[in-house]
Amino acid sequence: MIGANKDSIGEPRLVRPVHPSSAVHGHRVMLGVLLVLIFIAAVVGVVFAAVSGQGTVALIIALFAGAFFSRVGC
């Protein structure tokens, strides 16, 4: 086993430094934009269905949107 019985564990390995900008990628930005568009479409769908007198459809859309965003958030 390396490091046991007073053996050297070797030279430390160099790692790439973490920069604040390394967490932002185009892929994450596009996913964020897509989630915002899905949220807007869900709200518009619920409002339009409710204004049209389709309360049951509005409730179903709201339930599906809530289930989708609870799955994405968790």
Image (cartoon, helix red, strand yellow):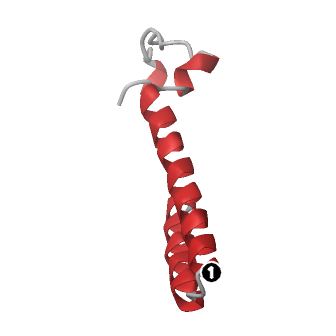
**Which quadrant does the C terminus fall into?**
bottom right
Picture residue at 57% right of the left edge, 81% below the top:
58
Q: Residue at x 58, y 72 (%)?
A: 48
Which residue is nearer to you in this view: 31 or 1? 31
User: In which quadrant of the rendered view does residue 13 lie?
Assistant: top left
**Callout 1 amino acid:** Ala
Residue most extreme to the front: 52
Q: Residue at x 58, y 81 (%)?
A: 52
Position of residue 52 relative to residue 28, above or below, is below
| Residue under label 1 | 50
> How far across and down, in percent of the image, does residue 10 sit?
42, 12
Image quadrant holding the N terminus, namely: top left
Q: Residue furthest bottom?
A: 56
- Nearest the viewer among 61 and 1 is 61
- Looking at this rendering, what residue extends furthest in the left direction? 1
Task: Say left or right for 47 vs 63.
Answer: right
Residue occupying the point 60% across, 89% down: 55
Dividing the picture into quarters, in which one does residue 63 lie? bottom right
Judged from the image, the secondary structure of the residue bearing numbered disc 1 is helix
Relative to residue 57, is residue 69 depicted above or below? above
Which x, y percent locates residue 59?
Answer: 58, 85
| Mark 1 burial class by Cα count in 10 Å: few <14, some 14-19, many 20+ | some
Spot occupied by residue 50 in the image (x, y as percentages of width and height) = 62, 81
Closer to the camera in the image, 68 or 23: 68
